[in-house]
Image (tube, rainbow, N blue to C red):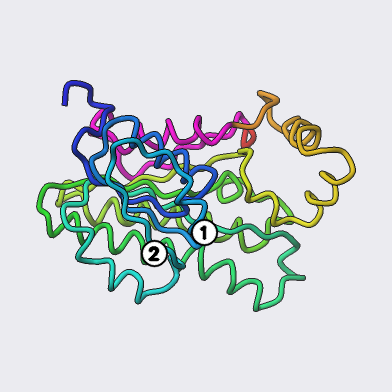
Amino acid sequence: MTNPADFEGRIALVTGASSGIGAACAELLAERGAAKLILVDVDEAGMAALDLGKSEAVRITGSVADEALWDDLGPQLEGLNHAVVNAGIGTGGALADITMAEWRRVMDVNLDGAFLTMRSAIRAMRDGGNGGSVVITASSTGVKPVPGTGPYGVSKAAVAHMARMAAAENAVAKIRVNAIAPGGVDTAIWESGPDFVAAVAKHGREAVIANMAKTTPLGRFATSRETAQNILYMLSDAAPNLTGHVLVDDGGFTL
């Protein structure tokens, strides 16, 4: 490759690919020459709407927490170079008030699903014998304890540590594993919070996001594409010595 940040001829897996950070990663990988994109999401229509240019696209509709999905997908991951472990769902509430059902609902996708995705990706890369790179989407709420983020924050702290463990275990196979911990990003995940939905109905989405962004020193939320650019840097050959790192990308929120 003439530019180490390009992905010419590469095969990449992206979960949570129908919107937000996942969609931005898929489209940016396509722009940078990825030959094949394997996309996984529960939202079939969202994946179909992506602009992936000349990249071959394999779209898998289903939950990342379904082990059978990964068993079936295994053969299609042959030759995999990169993986963005991004699928996740949000929730809110104090830990003492969260039901076990809600706890399991979030952990099922955010932690178990991330584990199954990462495991499948690493196995494919290891079998290929040419190394590879993985980036897992964590969160600044997994770095800084934010009251009211409940199992979401806990799950994101867990996947960040999972990335570090996987990095230590797979360095010998030339597989790099990192995590990104975004702060506020203007994505559809906010819609899962009833307080946010109520505020939008009253004040409008733009005003609500702007008000929330005041909690960050930079006074802004990131766009999905900005976060995707940082993810692709960690995935790319431009970061050959970067592994076991959790990149906090939060506008200074955790300072």
* Local SS, label 1: loop
Q: Position of residue 80 (x, y in %)?
A: 21, 51
From which residue to which does the magenta span run? Answer: 223-252
Q: Residue at x 51, y 55 (%)?
A: 45
User: In the image shown, does 80 or 91 lie closer to the viewer?
Assistant: 80
163 above or below 217? below
Q: Position of residue 56 (x, y in %)?
A: 27, 46
User: In the image shown, does 86 or 59 lie closer to the viewer?
Assistant: 59
Q: Residue at x 40, y 58 (%)?
A: 40
Q: Amino acid at mark 1?
A: Asp
Q: Position of residue 133 (x, y in %)?
A: 27, 45
- In the picture, the quarter occupied by the C terminus is top right
Say if the magenta span includes residue 225.
yes
Say if the magenta span includes residue 101.
no
User: In the image shown, does 48 or 206 lie closer to the viewer?
Assistant: 48
Residue 132 left/right relative to 95: left
Asked which quadrant contains residue 205, the reply is: top right
Residue 222 left/right relative to 206: left
Nearest to N terminus: mark 2 or mark 1? 1
130 above or below 99? above
The residue that disc 1 covers is 43
* Local SS, label 2: helix
The crowding category of the residue bearing disc 1, from other C-alpha atoms within 10 Å (few below 14, some 14 to 19, many at least 20), is some
31 above or below 123? above
Q: Position of residue 92 (x, y in %)?
A: 72, 59
- In the picture, the quarter occupied by the N terminus is top left
The residue that disc 2 covers is 115
Q: Residue at x 63, y 48 (%)?
A: 188
